[in-house]
Image (spheres, rainbow, N blue to C red):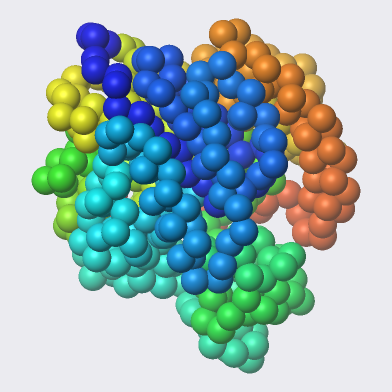
Amino acid sequence: MSEIRTTTPAVVFTTSADPLLHGPLAVVRSLGRLGVPVYVLHPGRRLPLDSSRYLAGRFALGTRGDDGRHVVDRLVEIARKFSTSPVLVPVDDEAALIVDDNDARLSEHYLFPRRPPGLATRLASKQELTSTCRSLGVPAPDAWFPATREEARACVAALPVVVKAVDPVMLRRAPGARSVTLAFDVEQALAAYDLLVAGGPGNVMVQEYIPGDASTIWMFNGYFDAGSRCRFGATGVKLRQCPPGTGPTSLGEARDHDGVRRAAERLLVSVGYTGIVDLGFRYDARDGVMKMLDVNPRIGGTFRLFTGQDGLDVVRSLYLDLTGQDVPQDTVREGRRWQDEPHDLLSQAVSRRRGTPTWSDWLASARRVDERAWFAADDRRPFILSLKHTAARSRRGLARVAGASGPDPAAVPLAGGPSPALDGSAVDGDRSS
């Protein structure tokens, strides 16, 4: 990339204290390597990301109230420490929604994309997204939104099904609940329902399960400017996820897919979207259609998979645009790979207990990785400090995930149809279901 102005600071904002949340670290490294002063605001005491050589400083979030006013007050307090308005980068669902809901006040102190009121909330809600996809003719899996346990039971006639939280904020009020559960029997589905409604009514979506392994799941990452023009966008595919069958990407590969790109841009432009976005799709071999799974109105944890050959990514695009600089053209190399080491290790351990793949296969795939979430030769300390958390999570994860009932999701047979078209020729995001 050509020389850029880096005097404007950036504040990375997360409401999560997860020590292995790699998204904030990736933002710190991406902007810090350019020379941008990057600060982080999080609720943890000391996290591995705090040790990055590219971090200019950290702020504690402190005690939080239920209405989020304390968080906004804290953000304003931090902004006043700088001589110029910093770029604000929320990196989780709740942080993004706090910024969206308090747009007017925070925009007096920070630089961030301004959106139509409530847009992030509508896109983050699984129910609102389903309605939007239907109105625009964007293919999506069938979904139901049960209001009672009896309605939930009626929704699971065709098993397996996917039980999801509708609202990411309500999910935090439901101890023990998972955002996504793949249920193979009625009892498993109802148990997931019970956990989710503990956080509040109306927070359950029962979604049709589309069979296939991780490689049927596609991603789009992009940055849209104030005119809702896509200034940087790329597509890729999951190779592994954690936990297997339902979790976030642990190993991903950049692959161009015109159908996914056009479907994503069609949806986002139609609603006037601005800022960074992370979308998920799944190829349905039963009817040959790529279907939208979710929209994350924020930076995605895998965004460094989508790094151009000249170093551009979505967070650098955001920074350049918001500071009045040109966003250059850049393309992601086909086949570029990114790995989240702790969770990819856990995913492999779980999959190995189920029979495949072998450890030698896993090591061979890991050697082909271009960038890792934690290890970086120029910034090793966060990786070293993450190791104890990785060991603890692996022990807990193996006991919980490997001991769960139900078959390997990747082993659920397809109902026939062709293999996923990876070149985009046979899978069109504009086709109806």
In the displayed structure, 280 sits above or below 149; it is above
From the viewer's perspective, is 48 left or right of 251?
right
Of 426 and 72, nearer the camera is: 72
Of 411 and 92, nearer the camera is: 92
From the viewer's perspective, is 338 left or right of 317?
right
- Work out which quarter of the rendered image holds the N terminus and state it: top left
- Measured as percent of width and height from the top left, residue 246 is found at 62, 51
- Measured as percent of width and height from the top left, residue 116 is found at 21, 61
Residue that appears at 66% across and 44% down: 44
In the displayed structure, 362 sits above or below 126; it is above
Q: Quadrant of residue 317?
A: top left
Q: Quadrant of residue 42?
A: top right
In the displayed structure, 393 sits above or below 433; it is above
Residue that appears at 64% across and 23% down: 51
- Measured as percent of width and height from the top left, residue 347 is found at 72, 37
* Res 32 visible: yes
Report how many numbered discs are placed on residues in the image: 0
* Res 279 visible: no
Residue that appears at 47% across and 53% down: 74
Q: Residue furthest left?
A: 227
- Work out which quarter of the rendered image holds the C terminus and state it: bottom left
In the displayed structure, 359 sits above or below 69; it is above
Residue that appears at 47% across and 32% down: 39
From the viewer's perspective, is 124 left or right of 415?
left
- Measured as percent of width and height from the top left, residue 61 is found at 56, 49
Of 284 and 81, nearer the camera is: 81
